[in-house]
Amino acid sequence: MIFRDTIAAIATPPGVGGIGVIRISGSGAEGIARRLFHPSFPLPSFASHRLYHGRIVAPETGETLDEVLISFFRAPRSYTGEDILEISCHGGPLVLRSVLLETLRAGARPAERGEFTKRAFLNGRLDLAQAEAVLDLITARTREGLSAAISRLEGRLSGRIEAIRSEIAGLLASVEAAIDFSGEEGGPETPEIALSAFQSVIDGIAALAATGRRGRIVREGIGIVIAGRPNVGKSSLLNRLLGENRAIVTPIPGTTRDFIEEALDIRGIPVRLTDTAGIRPPENAVEKEGIDRVRERLETADALLVLLDGNSPLAEGDGEILRQAAGKPFLAVINKIDLPQRLDEAELRRRLPENAPRPVRISAKTGEGIERLDEALHGLVLGAPEAEAPEAMVADLRQQASLEKAAESLTRARDGLDGGLPPELIALEIRDALDALGEITGKTTPEEILEQIFANFCLGK
């Protein structure tokens, strides 16, 4: 696709740095370079994929704005598939703004969010799943998130989608052959396709869709709230998991009055861990407000970590928290195992739901059992024991919804075939399945969805 305009933006984060990069893409990129760039040595032409040293000079005033390195990438061998000019300046905000302003005066316009990647998609350099992976790569918070984004950027999810679409296209070809011959004397009225062929494709789609939960958790993270009675060690556990003294720890009940939320990496999963006030009958209005907020936070949490004091018997407050936690994923954790144990673990297990994970025993003070807790939290978050990440993994609800839509269409096609429906109706369902999968890679994605996706990108990418 040929765009008439040339776009420009600062491609590096705001603030002071050693280097700042301005990216220009479009047919006017080389003209802008010739207008603003004064090379250190005579330069008859720009070779693609080479670095050149020189100065950026404002044409109207002759003022040198910065000493720079520039690189020029000729179409189609560039990120966007267009001519691209990248100017590496010194990383001061004033320098970058000054150089960017001159590129705009020289004929470029400010790029919109994600416009460089959108042009790469529209010019066939990336499909939509790969384009989304670029954003995930930038925003990844854990190694597993980074690995999953790289996998999608390399096209592993796209390759799996295209393999499934190829199988569906084969089914469609068989059905359309039946349509072509149905008018001939003696021709088949319904296609001769085994129902198992449909089921095989449906199963493949279901297996890929099943990766969606892990994909979203790795990409977006999960919120876990630490709940418990006062002085069971919630703040000590937060500090232990973070490896720093983030929360104040005292023997005085009610020290924590408000939430303390911190981010951490639990075996590749980004987790927002929240320390809360201890739940007990409030002694004043301030404490009551804090406890009311804790109950609200328990309702909205993705998962709960219920902390219990192993040095004391189960109390009524423990039972209240366990009852409130029963409606969502939670893990019971027995703290203070470095002290004499007075908690009846058999009684605790009787109070837990049948499918609840086995309680974990730890000492937030000494660190004993923390590795076991990490493993149990990883299993709690993923809903299954720790397992190797699949090679192709769905990243978000949009992709998962498209897979589910494709599976539903194929199921209707299979049932229609079994029920003797005309092949024309079966073909319509199969085409709907192809379109649904095409939305993942961008072959059939509506324009408004594309706009929403690229609006989430930063400027300069």
Image (cartoon, rainbow, N blue to C red):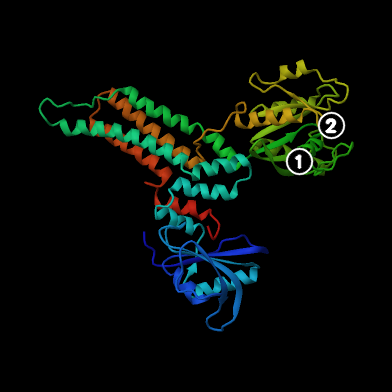
Residue 15 in view, yes or no? no
Query: Residue tagged by mark 2?
Result: 366
Which of the 4 image quarters holds residue 26?
A: bottom left
Left or right of 149? Residue 358 is right
Amino acid type, label 2: Thr
Q: Position of residue 444 (x, y in %)?
A: 37, 46
Q: Position of residue 365 (x, y in %)?
A: 84, 33
The local crowd at label 2, few if under 14, some if 14 to 19, many if 20 or more residues have their Cα within 10 Å, is few
* Label disc, if present, on residue 69 of the rendered structure: none
**C-alpha separation, residue under disc 1 versus residue under disc 2:** 14 Å
Residue 100 position (above or below residue 318) = below
Residue 10 position (above or below residue 341) = below
The residue lying furthest to the front in this view is 41
- SS of the residue at dot 2? loop
Query: Residue tagged by mark 1?
Result: 242
Residue toward you, 134 or 447: 134
- SS of the residue at dot 1? helix
Residue 94 in view, yes or no? yes
Left or right of 318? Residue 78 is left
Q: Position of residue 65 (x, y in %)?
A: 60, 76
Ranked by sequence position, the earlier of labels 1 and 2 is 1
Residue at left offset 43%, top offset 70%: 28
Q: Position of residue 233 (x, y in %)?
A: 82, 33
